[in-house]
Image (tube, helix red, strand yellow):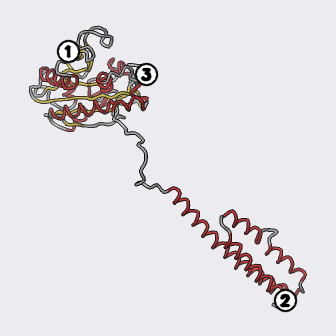
Amino acid sequence: MSNPGISEQISSLVTEAREAASASKSLAELEGARVRYFGKKGMFTGLLRSLGAMPQEERPAAGQSVNQGREDAEAFFAAATENLKKKEREEKLFAETIDVTEPRGNNGIGSLHPVTIALRELVDLFVGMGYETVEGPEVEYDKYNFELLNQPKNHPARDAQDTFYIEENIVLRSHTSPVQARTMLARRPPIRIISAGRVYRADEFDATHSPVFHQLEGFYVDKNVTMSDLKGTLEVFAKRLFGENTKTRFRPSFFPFTEPSAEVDLTCPTCGGKGCRLCKNTGWIEMLGSGMVNPKVLELCGIDSSVYSGFAFGIGLDRVGMLRYAVPDMRWLFEGDVRMMRQFR
């Protein structure tokens, strides 16, 4: 290039740009320097415009030298950008690092929910009596929730359960009894199972009702199973959960999947059967439904009712938790208030 002054200006500008890139301490500062050198009014742009005053034959070579110098300077800025990004990323990771060995104050120990406590006690009790735990889906086919349990289409007993329908033949299970049907279809007697979980009914949400609640279902089918076996099982349950002095009372009832059927009352755990506000001065608390498996249910599930018999019972886990721990309002079990949960540590 014939003009030594341009060469010196380019060299000086490249050196200056390199130093500015190296001196930048942040991406924002680096961006300011980039605009200063490469922006529309930047130094390299100004230098290119100044070439118009040069002789025409010298301009191409001078322009090429300026562009080459600009590329060299931009390479310094690109490298500086990567270094600053890496540095900021490392600083952010360091600032967010958690030292798991650092001593901290006690944030409080969690506790089991009263329904979970009741469930675990009942599972331990019935497993100790030879029952096996079995689970089933909460979104269930009408076939298992109703039809195989002796409740065909348009059966009046369906109305009493206020079922949530997802589709015509798909429901949110209204009880845990579908597990019975699924188990009988998959196995041959003897069958001795319990099944626990959430169930759903279109009910009020108040002190004693909820559209979502928890059940534990017990089910036993074998040869020569009688009502005496059911009564003995539930007496063991009552005494184990509420004390040796607890008595049971069976009242005739109706369920389409059991025959005969019975509601089971226990002596009030608060007053011991003497009468109080909780039991409305009767001395008894209604606890669960039970009965002998309806022979028609056995036949629908492929089990010969002339050879086998069985019993079933359904326990409301929420009710057990409320009675065991004197919880007066069912809504408290679902609100997740830590002040209540802390009491069960």
- Residue at 56 percent across and 62 percent down: it is 89
Q: Secondary structure at mark 1?
A: strand
Can you identify the residue that label 2 sits on?
A: 3
Q: Is 114 or 261 nearer to us in this picture?
A: 114
Label 3–label 2 contact, CB within 8 A: no
> Which residue in the protein does label 3 denote?
205
Q: Position of residue 288 (x, y in %)?
A: 26, 20
Residue drawn at (87%, 88%) of the image: 57
Instruction: Sort mark 3 into few (<14), some (14-19) or many (20+) by Cα contacts within 10 Å.
Output: few
Which residue is under mark 1?
250
Q: Nearer the viewer, mark 3 or mark 2?
A: 2
Of residues 16 and 334, the one nearer the viewer is 16
Specify few, some or many for label 2: CA neighbours under 10 Å numbering under 14, 14-19, or 20 or more.
few
In which quarter of the view is residue 215 placed? top left
Relative vertical location of residue 250 with respect to residue 315 in this rendering, above or below: above
Which of disc 3 and disc 1 is earlier in sequence? 3
Residue at 44 percent of width and 55 percent of height: 99
At which x and y percent is residue 85? 60, 65
Q: Quadrant of residue 182?
A: top left
User: What mark, if any, has residue 311 been given in the picture?
Assistant: none
Separation of residues labelled 1 and 3 (CA atoms): 28 Å
Res 44 → quadrant: bottom right
For badge 1, the amino acid type reads Phe
Amino acid on which the number 2 mark rests in the picture: Asn
**What is the three-letter code of the residue carrying label 3?**
Phe
Residue at 31% x, 27% y: name it.
175
How crowded pointer 1 is (Cα within 10 Å; few <14, some 14-19, many 20+) is rated as some
**Real-space Cα distance between discs 3 and 2?**
92 Å
Left or right relative to 339: residue 37:
right
SS at circle 2: loop
